[in-house]
Image: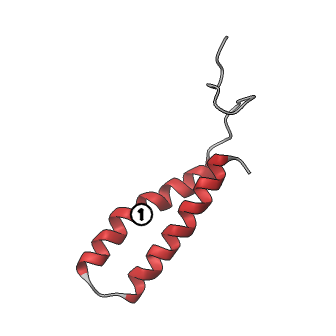
Amino acid sequence: MTPEKKSGLICLILSFIGFGILLTTNSEIVTYMVFSIFTPMFIYGIGMFLIPPTRRKKDGQIPFRGW
């Protein structure tokens, strides 16, 4: 598993935990914090699984360098 997909999976897991916290509480500040922190993590996690992989030969190199 690439580091990009691994970080996306971790973000998805954390965002599902955050949304679970949202369902169990009625506090307005907790609702605001969940939406401001965990919604971008959810979008990032989905994006990591939808975007195609980079075409790097080795880790740390810029893709398509040296054309």
Q: Residue furthest top?
A: 67
Q: Is residue 36 left or right of residue 63?
A: left
Q: How many marks?
A: 1
The amino acid at mark 1 is Thr
The residue drawn where x is 65% and y is 54% is 6
The residue drawn where x is 48% and y is 57% is 43
Name the image quarter holding residue 59: top right
On the image, the x and y values in percent for residue 37 come to 37, 63
Q: Is residue 42 left or right of residue 24?
A: right
What residue would you read off at disc 1?
Answer: 39
The residue drawn where x is 58% and y is 62% is 10
Name the image quarter holding residue 52: top right
Q: Residue furthest left?
A: 28
Looking at the rendered structure, the secondary structure element under dot 1 is helix
On the image, the x and y values in percent for residue 62 come to 61, 25
- How many neighbours does mark 1 have within 10 angstroms: few (below 14), some (14-19), or many (20 or more)? some
With respect to residue 39, does 63 lie above or below? above
On the image, the x and y values in percent for residue 27 come to 26, 84
Q: Of 60 and 41, which appears nearest the observer?
A: 60
With respect to residue 57, does 37 lie above or below? below
On the image, the x and y values in percent for residue 33 come to 31, 69
The residue drawn where x is 62% and y is 47% is 4
* Quadrant for the C terminus in the image: top right
* Chosen colour scheme: secondary structure
